[in-house]
Image: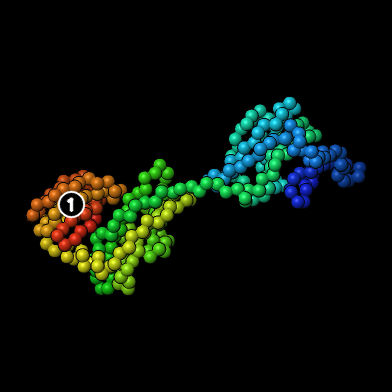
Amino acid sequence: MKEQYLYNDQTGVLTETQTFVWNENENDWELTGKVVNDYSNQFATDKTPRNFRAQESEGAYLLEWDQPVMEGLTGYKLYNGYESVAELDADARSMVYQITVKGLNPVYLAAVYGEHEVNISEILELDKIVGEEKEYPMPTFGDITNVEEKDYQVYYEMYWHAPETDMNVASYTVHFNEWPLEEEIQGTTYSCTLRRMLDDITFGVSAVYEDGGESEVDNRNYNLSELLTSIKNASKGNDIWSYQSNICIEASSIRSVEIYTVSGTKVVERVLSNGINLIKLPADVYIIKALTDNGTITKKVVNK
């Protein structure tokens, strides 16, 4: 046995179902029955699923409808264009059904009463349904650290703080002069080398989430010449290093220091005295921000 389905050319709605069996004498398929779906008065019957509606959410469509009369109802069929994409039980009262519908064909729900009566709902055009845009929190740009210049090249590291969200971040994208780099960054630091061709540079970072969504970019503008001059002036007579689980800061003009983990948690805020200051911390990677008479020193230190 086989079935053949006939549809309305304009709406894609199923209009007739034909049943065939194989006739060995005629060596051909023989029509043995058909079900004609008469929709001329469908919206006036209490057997029609009413108020069929959809809401786009995270790449899927949340479909809802009001229950028709239950007497004789055997189930539902959900159609996406010509294709039946789901069958539902009749006892699913006022249920919410979520399904990812491929394509943007007209979608409708059919209430089935036995074998010979089908009542369809309103037809929805999914391409005209716009859902609420999902918000993806962006990371917070930290600063440029460990900047050095050599042979017309600038070596630097940048760091940022992870976004405050329960959603899972898969990776980060670094942006240079508002152009994204192809490399997927794991963690919250990035090292790179630049040729001294431009002075005014924009650095940025965005978060890529596990569901494929991406945040906006948090940008910071820098002038490399001013940055290098500031670092050279601020570093005179000052040095920062790690020794035996201590952050060592030799200060002649450093007035205060803030120490952060690479995730952005502040672990130390202290006023320093002249000479060598020892700050004992667990083994980790830290961002040191030291305020001097001539500017701010920002440096990444691996404490072992």
Residue at 30% in and 54% down? 142
Residue visible at 76% across and 36% down in the picture: 44
Q: Which residue reaches farthest front? A: 44
**Is 190 on the left-hand or right-hand side of 55?**
left
Quickly name the residue at label 1: 257
For mark 1, give the secondary structure: strand
- Whole-percent x, y for residue 88 in the image: 66, 34
Q: In this view, does 287 lie to the left or right of 243?
A: right
At 16% across and 62% down in the image, what residue appears? Answer: 294
Q: Which picture quadrant has residue 123?
A: top right
Give the answer, above or below, for where 112 lies relative to 235.
above
Q: Which of 44 and 14 is in front in this view?
A: 44
Q: Where is residue 153 in the image (x, y as percent from the top left)?
A: 28, 70
Residue 22 percent across, percent down from the top left = 85, 42
Which part of the image, by quadrant, shows the N terminus? top right
The image shows residue 163 at horizontal and vertical percentages of 37, 48
Image vertical order of residue 292 relative to residue 16, above or below: below
Left or right: 135 in relation to 7: left
Colouring of the image: rainbow
Instruction: Report crowding for label 1: few under 14, some 14 to 19, many 20 or more residues within 10 A (C-alpha).
Output: some
Relative horizontal placement of residue 291, taking residue 211 as reference (left or right): left
| Residue at the top extreme, as displayed | 71
User: Looking at the image, which residue is at 12% across and 58% down?
Assistant: 253
Q: In which quarter of the image is residue 91?
A: top right
Number of numbered discs overlaid on the protein picture? 1
Image quadrant where residue 77 sits: top right
Q: Is residue 146 visible?
A: yes
User: Which amino acid is tagged 1?
Assistant: Val
Let me know if residue 19 appears in the view.
no
